[in-house]
């Protein structure tokens, strides 16, 4: 049942995305509302794809480097998969080819970024160093498990050898008891579990590991809001968030800005104030689109003319 307060928030937020969101956010929202084709999302991603097939150019707003990275490529793949873009799309095929070249065959993972992060301003947590893997749980889950999910989803266009090695590494990690750590590992794991084409034993192993990690989450962790872990009622493991959803929506409605947007809770203006201002503007579009999609998914708002 729609809620008048939520409906007003939805209408206001939708106006913000249309007026101030990136073209990509507008295309993704319109696609979600049934007002755009998958091709519109593909077209909006063109400026972010490099000639090597990977994605960069600030697609992940806290990472302005033009160079391709696994985190930016995974972000692009999220948009393409949500839009229903198939394996025959040239953008997808080029992105998958980049993944094969960027893969660490020895470790069985994708390093989340490379040293060329320093080509442009970025948040301090994206500082590159040779020991980066130690700070990112070996890249096992963020971004590697999510990227494996994309390979499953687009298997006809993906390297069978690459799928085999990435899957082997994941199963070895799970068997050894290596678990997701924190919100972003969980989000990446959930994207694999949501992948219909993923093998059942792989999904079962990941889901078991996610349950354990989610059970240890601090409910007040701003990096793990309930509506991101359970963006729709029927999502995998959404039942674990059931007791937090009402409070999450109450907080969502109470934190909407006067212009209709939602702002990020983080800030790296001390690193580069101008770059952060641009990143924050982009994030407002992203977060507002996500909020609107959650309101729709839970039936609290509807699309009105």
Image (cartoon, rainbow, N blue to C red):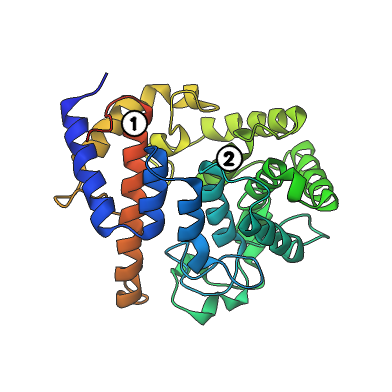
274 with respect to 154 (left or right): left
Q: Which residue is mark 1?
A: 296
100 with respect to 236 (left or right): right
In the picture, which quadrant includes the C terminus? Answer: top left
Observer-nearest of 24 and 72: 24
Q: Position of residue 276 (x, y in %)?
A: 33, 70
Question: Does dot 1 land on a helix, a strand or a loop?
Answer: helix
In the picture, which quadrant includes the N terminus? Answer: top left
Query: Where is 208 relative to 56, above or below?
Result: above
Q: Quadrant of residue 279?
A: bottom left
Asked if the residue at tag 1 contacts the one at tag 2, i.e. Cβ–Cβ closer than 8 Å, the answer is no
Query: Where is 109 relative to 205, above or below?
Result: below
Question: What residue is rendered at 53% in x and 54% in y?
Answer: 75
Observer-nearest of 168 and 258: 258
Question: Residue 39: which numbered mark, if any?
Answer: none
Q: CA distance from mark 2 to mark 1?
A: 20 Å
Q: Position of residue 163 (x, y in %)?
A: 79, 47
Q: Position of residue 192 (x, y in %)?
A: 63, 39
Q: Which residue is mark 2?
A: 191
Question: What residue is rendered at 53% in x and 30% in y?
Answer: 215
- Mark whose residue sits in front, 2 or 1: 1
Question: Does dot 2 land on a helix, a strand or a loop?
Answer: helix
């Amino acid at each position: 049942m729609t809620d008048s307060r939520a409906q007003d928030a939805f209408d206001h937020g939708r106006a913000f995305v249309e007026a101030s969101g990136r073209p990509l956010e507008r295309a993704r929202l319109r696609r979600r509302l049934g007002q755009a084709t998958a091709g519109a999302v593909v077209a909006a991603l063109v400026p972010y794809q490099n000639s090597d097939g990977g994605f960069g150019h600030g697609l992940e707003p806290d990472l302005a480097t033009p160079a391709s990275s696994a985190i930016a490529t995974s972000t692009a793949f999220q948009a393409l998969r949500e839009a229903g873009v198939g394996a025959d799309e040239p953008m997808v095929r080029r992105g998958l080819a980049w993944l094969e070249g960027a893969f660490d065959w020895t470790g069985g993972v994708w390093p989340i970024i490379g040293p060329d992060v320093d080509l442009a301003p970025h948040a301090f947590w994206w500082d590159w160093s040779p020991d980066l893997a130690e700070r990112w749980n070996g890249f096992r889950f963020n971004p590697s498990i999510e990227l494996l999910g994309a390979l499953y989803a687009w298997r006809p266009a993906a390297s069978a050898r690459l799928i085999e090695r990435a899957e082997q590494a994941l199963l070895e990690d799970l068997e050894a008891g290596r678990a997701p750590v924190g919100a972003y590992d969980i989000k990446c794991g959930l994207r694999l579990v949501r992948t219909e084409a993923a093998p059942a034993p792989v999904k079962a192993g990941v889901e078991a590991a996610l349950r354990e990690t989610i059970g240890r989450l601090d409910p007040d962790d701003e990096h793990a809001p309930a509506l991101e872990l359970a963006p729709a009622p029927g999502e995998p493991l959404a039942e674990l968030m059931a007791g937090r959803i009402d409070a999450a929506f109450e907080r969502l409605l109470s934190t909407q800005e006067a212009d209709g947007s939602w702002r990020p809770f983080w800030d790296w203006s001390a690193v580069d104030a101008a770059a952060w201002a641009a990143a924050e503007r982009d994030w407002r579009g992203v977060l507002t689109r996500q909020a609107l999609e959650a309101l729709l998914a839970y039936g609290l708002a509807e699309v009105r003319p």
